Image (cartoon, rainbow, N blue to C red):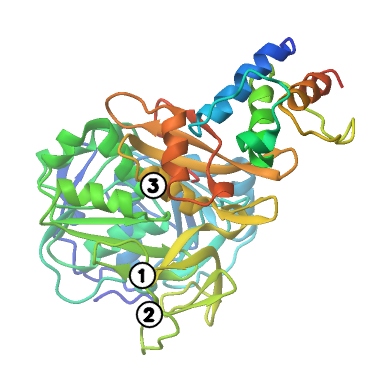
Amino acid sequence: MDELSRAQIRDLMAQVLANQGKALPDDDGTDLREIGFRSLDFSELALRVEDETGEELNFDAPGLRRIATVGDVLDFLVTLQRQ
Amino acid sequence: MTVATNGPATPGAEVAGLGNRLVVAGAALTWRELAEPALPSPGAVLAYGSADALAAARHHATYGTELLLTSAGRVDRAMRDELRGAGFTVTELAAGEARAVAPERERPAEPGRLWLLTSGSTGRPKRVGHTLDSLTTVRGGQPERTWLCPYAPGTYAWWQVVTLSLTQPGQHLVVVDPDELDDWPALAAAHGVDAVSGTPTFWRRTLHRDGAALARVPLRQLTLGGEPVDQAVLDRLREVFPAARISWIYASSEVGASIVVHDGRAGFPVEWLDRATPGRPTLSVDGEELVVTSPHHGAGLDGPVRTGDRVQVVDGRVLITGRLDSDEINVGGSKVSAGLVRDVLSAHPQVAWARVTGRRAPLLGRMVVAEVVPAAGPAPEEAALVRWCADRLPDHAVPRRVRLLPEIPVKETLKSDV
């Protein structure tokens, strides 16, 4: 299956937060700590991306970078799909 | 008992329950009226029908032959060869007709020996030695009952119901074949079944498929075993049968029936641990593993037996949560019991059945995920189930992906590998 767009990943991220009764702000510069998006949430988002694409993400490839904002999460997962 | 199970064969010996009623393949008869197959000893009988399996069991009870009994479908070619190599004549028994293949090597029979094939959840089935006596765990006067037997022939659970009927007058059997399993309540109601033993998966499936039909069966005894038993299934059965005795049993081919609980609660009281009573099993915990020293053990399994089952003590009850090798999920260094998460999900009013597993995930190694079969009515939303769990479990134990399944999966053992 084709890779997901940044907007599609954003929708999935919103779903992760919505399941916990939280909302995803429009601003990609929002700090993850502000919205309580933690490693469990990040991992869940990765699983959702995998489920949508049918492909396993390879987290060993790029080396984890600093991920502090909503935009960082989206950029990272977009990049990861291409590894 | 009148059967010599550990001595020489006693041809023609009378077995106490031979007058009990049987309903098998739609026909009503007694143990005494079953066909009399000619079965060699030592023999492995591969039964094609329920009546064939019962006939082999009665043959063993009467003559004390060495017997391994199983349904034909559980034994592949390699296992047949293995049995012949171990000195068994392998007999296919179909509608009373026996077709025997000689062993590769002859050996003397071990009188009274009964062999069980374990369910083989961790690989190929292995043989565990018993006798009719060590398989008979219900003794003393029992109220007259008509039992449903939904189990696959030759399994430990099957022998539990069969030995009860063979050895105790007034314990009748209605056998349900695999192709009748979905409609067993109608069969049971038609034949006056008032006692049923089944796995939690069996009971959940029945509640899920047709709870109204279940309620029409006049049950006085409900027994659960073979899998972890959670409070939700006990409570749902109690709602349907407020006056019946509801029991759960911990039993296995290796240690026999070791725990029997009648108080309607999951787990057993922590005070039962390390309590030595002559003639009864001693239960203990080593690390997180249940260890049982049982008088009902299989051959060569005397002394403490590590069961491979994981336990946790919660509110004064010892809960058996699942197999050690599959129950623990490590989420970023935090241990999660799949069984306890499953219990929380199963208690949701819109959930009929749940399976909880670990799935490979970035950063954390594994995450908790679940599969759920919805109860009748509107299907629950994933978000609602996640929130239900989040209100009752630590963050790392909350299943983050919940997949809905249309039907409760069940195997021949009536288990679903939860």
Disc on the earlier residue, 3 or 2:
3
Residue flagged by tag 3: what amino acid is it?
Ala
Q: Position of residue A32 (x, y in %)?
A: 69, 34
Image height of B182 relative to B413, above or below:
above
Residue at point 64%, 23% (across, down): A51
Question: Is B40 on the left or on the right of B278, as rendered?
Answer: right
Residue B268, numbered label: 1
Residue, disc 2: B272
What is the C-alpha distance between the residues marked 3 and 1?
27 Å
Residue flagged by tag 2: what amino acid is it?
Trp
Q: Secondary structure at mark 2?
A: helix
Is the Cβ of the residue at disc 1 closer than 8 Å to that at disc 2? yes
Residue, disc 3: B152
Is the Cβ of the residue at disc 3 closer than 8 Å to that at disc 2? no
Residue at point 41%, 25% (across, down): B406
Residue B176 appears in the picture as rendered: yes
What is the C-alpha distance between the residues marked 1 and 2?
7 Å
Same chain assignment for discs 3 and 2: yes
Q: Secondary structure at mark 1?
A: strand
Residue A37 appears in the picture as rendered: no
